[in-house]
Amino acid sequence: MASFMDATNQNMIRTQVFSSDITSLLLADLNALGFVRTLNDFPDGFNFNLPIVGEAEIATFNEGQALKYQQMDTGNFQFNFTDYVYSANSMTEKFKRDSWLSPQILALFPQRQHRAIMEYYETRVFQVGNNGQTASSLNTINGASHRWVASGATPALSFQDFAKVRYALTKANVNLKNPVAVVDPSTAYTLETQANVTNLMSPMGQWGSITTQGITSGFKYRFNVYGFDIYESNFLPSNISETINSVAVTNGVANFFFDATPGDTLPWVGAWRQMPTVQSKFDMDLQQWDYVTICEFGLGFFREQNFCNVLTSKSAVPA
């Protein structure tokens, strides 16, 4: 009796079988674009100028003496296009013919390239914020610090730092309508494990749900801390080593605090000379399809008053 068996008919069996589904990478949320005041009236040229008008002064009037007319202070904020970047991929004509996955891969090129550019944009926004301040300095405005090393052990962010940020922004005349904090994921751990939080878990209240649901929902905290909406980000400047006011941090990461109300008080301004644009062509010499997404934009650190930077150590989370 004839039969088919694995042991004797291995040439009839495929050794590798591939799914038609393509697994995507896990991607972090992107939030920085919403924190930038985007300017649209920059059609040509290299440098963009924003006029700044100061406040009027007051003086005591003395009867019989002429009034003194003061000139109002003026200034000018200038920035230019800083980044001309692209993301490019190719596919050979042979691979396009031979692979059953080639249509799916070609369809992924534009969205993956756009994602790569927007991750770069996210990183650049936060770099501009950190570089806009003076390193190893308190960056004092109206008598209040706007850059310091966190007050918790390690050092780690504490609730005292949130209160200090509110003080600093209020002293800088920032109207806190929509206060926002963008912090490193290690901050969630340090806040969840602080003794004053665990003590608040009994009797049960809003803090009590931390033990069952955690402190975050996605990349956003489930509640405010001192009025701040808190977002987690993996794109904040890191590997920072500084000593500020005799307090040192190594392997540090920047955590940003500001008011995110749309308008001219946002810490960042930006302009797009060319939005991310997809271009493609067939290269006859190489017999391949080329796809590129290219853009040009500029970013500037506009409102130092509406910005606090608290440095923490990633070592706050034990190995």
Image: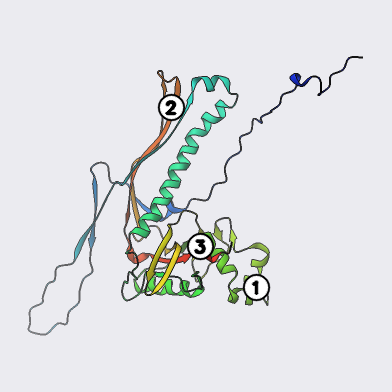
Tell me the number on the disc at residue 290.
2
- Amino acid type, callout 3: Lys
Seen from the viewer's position, the closer of residues 94 and 22 is 94
Label 2 neighbour load within 10 Å: few <14, some 14-19, many 20+: some
Please say if the residues under marks 3 and 2 sit with CB atoms less than 8 Å apart.
Answer: no
Residue 6, image x and y in percent? Answer: 81, 24
Residue found at x 60% / y 24%: 100
Position of residue 277 in the picture relative to residue 213 (left or right)? left
Seen from the viewer's position, the closer of residues 173 and 159 is 159
Q: CA distance from mark 3 to mark 2?
A: 41 Å
Residue wearing tag 3: 314
Specify the farthest residue to the top. 1
Q: CA distance from mark 2 to mark 1?
A: 57 Å
Specify the farthest residue to the bottom. 63
Between disc 3 and disc 1, the foreground one is: 3
- Amino acid type, callout 1: Gly
Counting residues from the start of the chain, the first of labels 3 and 1 encountered is 1
Can residue 178 be seen in this snapshot? no
Residue found at x 81% / y 23%: 7
Residue wearing tag 1: 205
Residue 248, image x and y in percent? Answer: 42, 70
Between disc 3 and disc 2, the foreground one is: 3
| Whether residue 56 is situated above or below residue 300 in the rendered picture | below
Residue found at x 59% / y 68%: 192
- Amino acid type, callout 2: Asp
Counting residues from the start of the chain, the first of labels 3 and 2 encountered is 2
Label 3 residue SS? helix
Counting residues from the start of the chain, the first of labels 2 and 1 encountered is 1
| Whether residue 159 is situated above or below residue 213 in the rendered picture | below
Between disc 2 and disc 1, the foreground one is: 2
Label 2 residue SS? strand
Seen from the viewer's position, the closer of residues 66 and 226 is 226
